[in-house]
Amino acid sequence: MLIQPQTQEVLARERALLAEIGTFLTARGAPFDVLSLAQTALSALDETFLLVVVGEFNAGKSSFLNALLETDLLGVGVTPTTDRIYVLVNGPENGKLENTDDPFVMRLTLNSKQLEGLALVDTPGTNAVIRRHQVLTEGFLPRADLLLFLTSADRPFSESERQFLTLAKRWGRSVLIIINKADLLGTELERQEVQTFVEQYTRETLGLTPPTFMVSSRGERNGGDPGFKALRADLESRLNEKERTRLKLENPLNIAASLLEGELERVKLAREVLKEDFALLEGLEGETRLHSEDMSAELAGQLARLDAHLEDFGRRATEYIEDRMRIQKIGSLLRGKELEQGFEREAVADLPQRLEQTLSGAVDRLLERNLRFWEDTQGRLRQRQDIKLPETRFQMDRQNLMQNIVTKADVQLSSLTHEDFAQRFVADAQGALVTSGLTAVGGIGLGALTVALVSTTALDITGITAGITLTALGALVLPARRRAAVAKVRSSIENTRRTLHALISREYALEQERFTARLSDTMAPWTRFIRLERDKLEEGERGVLERRGKVEALRREILG
């Protein structure tokens, strides 16, 4: 551990800050890998200084390390022989191999003064055929205090190397670039071209140009290599106690800064998702209002159809009365049953069927429009449900909520059946008619309801003619009775019209109230979730910015 007096106070504050950030990210419901890296950053303060060597398979990492440490203990071959991570530490038993808590990490002891005060890590190739090699290498990257990145002079800066350096940039690793196998280049011009090429693309990837060394492991083992000499001098200056302490303190802060930046991005993404969610809810509210207005227009159209049928009935009834209530047809006037049957046949005619069809059509149209609206709403909910987000607590809470809402929408949609709605419509209509005293008949259908409203008209007409006798028929009596009959028809029609208008309007209003209440009930948990999460995300963003400021202040103190 770093226990020098001059670092104790800074170390204690950094440890407290990293612990605070870990607690904050846990409370925020950050993904498991983020929480694991937060723990890695904290644990790194108590680890030996880690000098990590990375690069593609066959870039010559093992031969490079053998030359650097003046040993032959590391395997060299044309296949991915380094099948796990080896941590090389100084110790009296040269070549002692030990297991660690991680089954893919081995500890190898070398009796080497070059390893005093640090551990050197040999990793699998980033492009190895065995995919696990790359996973192990990338997973070990955040723990590195200094990164030696090897590329081969015969295949400099491949795409997999560029991708790996992008990871190094993310974690803010300090990097040295080493171009190995320089002996494969025949001329100094070739060496310069390769070094220029590597420096250019490293700068484009990292945004800076780290120190670059052209070395030959074979040349170093065969008498010495100028590139190795320059590299050793640079490492000695970087790995003195003061510089190691600075890097050891700085690198966990780089991890913390990256994790906080990731949390800030997750907050921004979640806020954008909530913004779109809220926009959908507002849109649904507006569309629900428009739907209600459309249904009002639909209702007006259905009522106009009813009025047209009643007007046709009024015209036929008037024509019948005008034709029958004349002195020339006194015989039929005196036969009430015949007059009643004729009125039902010629005036009433198919009015009940037409009214029933119109009422049934009103039910069908209302149900159809509501079903279509629910189906559209359900489809849009499913689209929002399918949005992919990072595995965070926000994502899990939202996913569970959306699943519940979609399920509830499915239930609501399945409940909007024609049979149930028609039965409810008839039941409510019966109740309205019974309450109004227009009929006391129970258990009748839509057609019977309309018959109940108009079938008494014929009786009313014949009632007007009751008591008429031959002696009572005069020039003034019959016209008066005829006008009374027409007036009675018009009154009956108006009463029927008002009753049907009130009935259908009432049922439309009740159904739309039910519809809006079901929609509101389904969406209410989502609305609450959005409001609560919006406040949490704002608080989370403030928390990230506050802790990021603390990280930057401590980093400046360490670097200064």
Image (spheres, rainbow, N blue to C red):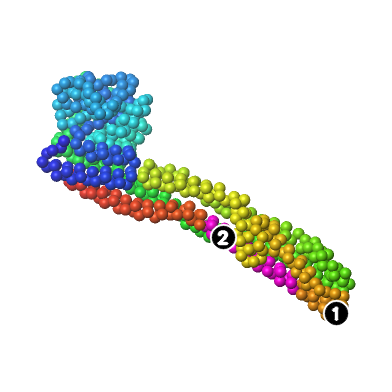
The disc label shown at residue 475, or none: 1
Vertical order, 301 against 474 (above or below): above
- Is residue 44 in the magenta section? no
Q: Count the numbered circles shown.
A: 2
Amino acid at pointer 1: Ala
Depth check, front residue: 73 or 443: 443
Residue 202 shows up from this direction:
no
The reply, left or right, for residue 424 in relation to residue 495 is left
In percent of width and height, residue 194 lies at 31, 30
Residue 253 shows up from this direction:
yes
Which range of residues does the magenta coloring cover? 487-516
Q: Farthest residue in the right direction?
A: 328
The reply, left or right, for residue 290 in relation to residue 174 is right
Point out the image quarter for the N terminus. Answer: top left
The reply, left or right, for residue 224 in relation to residue 339 is left
Q: Residue at x 33, y 21 (%)?
A: 79
Q: Residue at x 18, y 31 (%)?
A: 118
In percent of width and height, residue 325 lies at 83, 72
**Between tags 2 and 1, which lies in front?**
1
Task: Decide: few, some or many residues near mark 2? Use Cα within 10 Å; few <14, some 14-19, many ≥20.
Answer: some
> What residue would you read off at disc 2?
510
Vertical order, 46 against 61 (above or below): below
Task: Decide: few, some or many residues near mark 1? Use Cα within 10 Å; few <14, some 14-19, many ≥20.
Answer: few
Amino acid at pointer 2: Leu
Q: Secondary structure at mark 1?
A: loop
Label 2 or label 1, whichever comes before in sequence order: 1
Q: Residue at x 33, y 34 (%)?
A: 164
Vertical order, 100 against 333 (above or below): above
Question: Does the magenta stretch mainly form a helix, a strand or a loop?
Answer: helix
Q: Residue at x 28, y 47 (%)?
A: 24
- The answer to which quarter of the image holds residue 466 is bottom right
- Is residue 493 in the magenta section? yes
